[in-house]
Image (cartoon, rainbow, N blue to C red):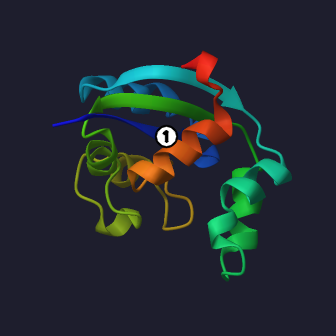
Amino acid sequence: MPIERTLAIIKPDAVAAGNTGKIISMIEENGFKILALRKQQLTRADAEGFYAVHKGKGFFAELVEFMTEAPVILMALEREDAIVKWRDVMGATNPEKAEAGTVRKLYGANIGRNASHGSDAPETAAFEISWFFRGSEL
């Protein structure tokens, strides 16, 4: 299995609720190496650019508003099959459908406020990591 990198975001809802440490513990317990980590307040430009793939969709404005309402935790993670493994740890996008013990089941409120983000493919991961971290930070 190849070593991969993925971007993980602990979203504003989980940060505000004080769940950052619990989620980082889950990451480490699942064998991820944290290559870079930063707490950051996203600007509107940050969020709009990062989520540009969703521009024009009905939820875009709400997503940008949510992601800029409070700080997030940005992380570049690495391990074998990092993309799939992080998505497994996060659980389904809708916390109501997520498996017990996953980040979203434990800490997500609903499909829009679901506590975490993860890349969905190697190409997406490369873009997303480079959006927030320079090579020298990794």
Quarter of the image with the N terminus is top left
Instruction: State the residue at coordinates (29%, 29%).
Output: 79
Q: How many marks?
A: 1
Give coordinates of residue 78: x percent, y percent: 36, 28
Residue 74 against residue 21 in the figure, above or below = below
Type of the residue with mark 1? Leu
Give coordinates of residue 116: x percent, y percent: 49, 48
Instruction: State the residue at coordinates (76%, 71%).
Output: 61
**Residue extending furthest toward the left:** 1
Asked whether residue 14 is in view, the answer is no
Instruction: State the residue at coordinates (51%, 43%).
Output: 126
Left or right: 106, with 30 as reference point = right
Residue 27 against residue 106 in the figure, above or below = above
Q: Residues within 10 Å of mark 1 (few under 14, many from 20)?
A: many
Instruction: State the residue at coordinates (63%, 24%).
Output: 38
Give coordinates of residue 99: x percent, y percent: 23, 57
Element class at badge 1: strand
Give coordinates of residue 81: x percent, y percent: 25, 40
Residue indicated by mark 1: 7
Left or right: 109, with 58 as reference point = left
In the depicted view, which residue is nearer to us: 135 or 18? 135
